[in-house]
Image (spheres, rainbow, N blue to C red):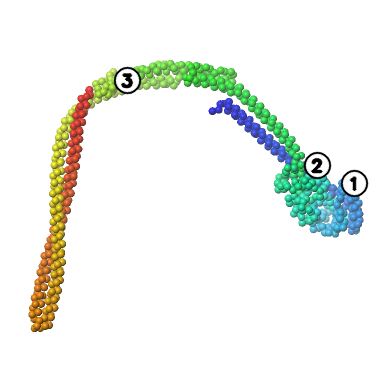
Amino acid sequence: MLSIGKRITILIITISFILLVSSFFILNHFKSEIVSDVYEDEKNTLLSKIKDRMGAKFDVGITNAVAIANSANIIKALEENDRELAIATLKSVGELYKSETNFKNVKIHIHDKDLKSFLRNWNVEKFGDDLSGFRHTLKSLKSTKKSMAAIEVGRNGLTIRGLTPIIKDGNYIGSLEFMQAFESVINQFASQKENLLVLMNDKLLDIATLADTKSRVSNYILSQKTVDENFFKSAQKIDTKELLSNGYSLDEKYFYTYSDIKDFEGNSIGIYLLAKERASVEKAIEGASSIIRSALALVVGLIIIITIAILITIRKIVLNPLETFEEGLLRFFDYLNKESKEAKPIDIHSLDEIGKMAQVVNENILRTKQSIEEDRVLIEDVKRVVSEIERGNLVQSVVENTKNQALNELKDNLNKMLSSLQSSVCKNVNDLIATLDHFKNSDFTADVKSDNGKIALAVHNMGDTIRSMLKLSNQNADELSQKSLILKDKMQNLSAASSEQASMLRDLSHAMESTNSSIIDVSQKAKHVASQSMDIKSVINVISDIADQTNLLALNAAIEAARAGEHGRGFAVVADEVRKLAENTQKSLHEINVSIETLSQAILEIGTAIEEQVEDINHATDSIKDIDKTTTQNASYTKEIENIAIELESMSAETLSQMHTKKF
């Protein structure tokens, strides 16, 4: 468990660390914003320069175009279609510019009213070509009859053109354009260690057919004559998507930005790629970073100093007094826990909140010592009372008092308990225990006297009850002993009779089984006779069949004798006797058959009667067996009752013996 001092220290250090980290992130955020602002300022500066310088170029172009176009010779040359006059005039103008201005190679192009080339001072042999197909500025100029300056795509790429109409007597007779390259602007940037690339969108190559397509940056074509090769190589490596998206881009050497190049109609036809050495741009950033680092170091130093000062102050004002306060409390707790015999007051060095707390604790230490002493006296009195109670004397009470409410309640409860014990139990426990010891030793002649305690009265009444019960039990045991002897004799007689009855029933059962066996034998013999009668009947049937055959043979013999006439008379007599014999045989067989039928029926009736007798005898035998089983069980029960009677007689004798050992 961390101490308050350690927790406060950790808290302050944590807060300081958070402040340091916050300061670091805030200042770094400022630095990032400064970096962003520096880059934005550099971008805006370069864009402002290109805007101003190109504006100046436009002004120069218009001014010079207007001045040359108002030359009488130029107007006359167009009116009279006198190209020689125009050539001579432009030649003198060119020489004047070379000698008096920075324009060394002035390009002037005169167009007739039909938008065809009238004269190119740099190529006088080429003229008469129709310009209306791709020179939209000329169409606009002829339509508005107002001077203008614009960047337009030509055969060689992008060109700065100052155009003015040539008017005579209110009629449009042609136009003149003062053409400029971008080199002067490029040189201006270079003089300040800045770079400019004029780049044309490669979608316009169908117009700028003479442009150098090899010199490109991404999807842009270089549209200038002079170029810093090192810068151009670096520019070719930049991510133009990032440049166009963010407005600026950086590599190891340069800071880049751009501005759209638009024609007179506002269509984007390319970009100015502007650049400055990164080192010069980041000088401002480095200065801001140096200031931020200094500020961060200052903040860190201040936070550390403030943290140390706070820690020292808290240690002196809070932690040291708290430690003193803690030591005093621990000494006091040692005193309360009986680990120390003395409770010294807490040292007070100030009267702040901790000092006031120490004063309050000291006052409570004093009161607690007094209260503990009173408690000690009361506890000694309680020990005295407990000692008397241990001796069995319950007629006691605690008389000492204390300011400790809990101990006073304990004293009152103890006194109430003692009073309750006197009324509920007894006055002297030893007398009660002695009486109970006599009871335990089967001596019920002892008694508790002169004690109104409920348990003492209960023991007294219990002794009277036990004595009365023992007297009654003694009488009952004596009577039970006599009755058990009589019961034992009766049960012995009943047991003998039951055994004899069971034996007789078993003999009767055996006799019935023997009779049943004889009857069954007779029944089987009767069935055998009936079977033989059926066999005799079968034999009689066979004899009857033979008699029928004999009778038929005798009839045939008589017929044959009749056919024989006198010779067969003797044979006829014999055949007649044979026939009579067969008839008598059949008659006798019929009588025998009737007798056998009667005999068989009688035998069957006898068999049925015998079976009925057998069934009745079986029922009787089963009943005798059931009676025998019941009689046997009764004999067993009688034997058990006899044993119980014997045990009861033994128990009665033992009870009488025990009763004789008790005093009452």
Q: Residue at x 72, y 39 (%)?
A: 35
- Could you say which quadrant of the image residue 539 lies in? bottom left
Within 10 angstroms of label 2, few (less than 14), some, or many (20 or more) residues? few
Identify which residue, 10 or 263, lies in the foreground.
10
Q: Residue at x 70, y 37 (%)?
A: 31
Determine whether, in the image, residue 393 is placed left or right of residue 606.
right
Q: CA distance from mark 3 to mark 1?
A: 147 Å
Determine whether, in the image, residue 335 is placed left or right of residue 396.
right
For the residues labelled 2 and 1, say whether their Cβ atoms are less than 8 Å apart. no
User: Which residue type carries mark 2?
Assistant: Gln
Q: Position of residue 369 (x, y in %)?
A: 48, 17
Determine whether, in the image, residue 583 is placed left or right of residue 99.
left
Residue matched to label 2: 192
User: Which residue type carries mark 3?
Assistant: Val
Q: Residue at x 9, y 74 (%)?
A: 580
Q: How many marks?
A: 3
Q: Residue at x 78, y 47 (%)?
A: 229
User: Which residue type carries mark 1?
Assistant: Glu
Residue matched to label 1: 100
Residue matched to label 3: 429
Among the two numbered marks 3 and 2 on one chain, the one whose residue lies closer to the N terminus: 2
For the residues labelled 3 and 2, say whether their Cβ atoms are less than 8 Å apart. no
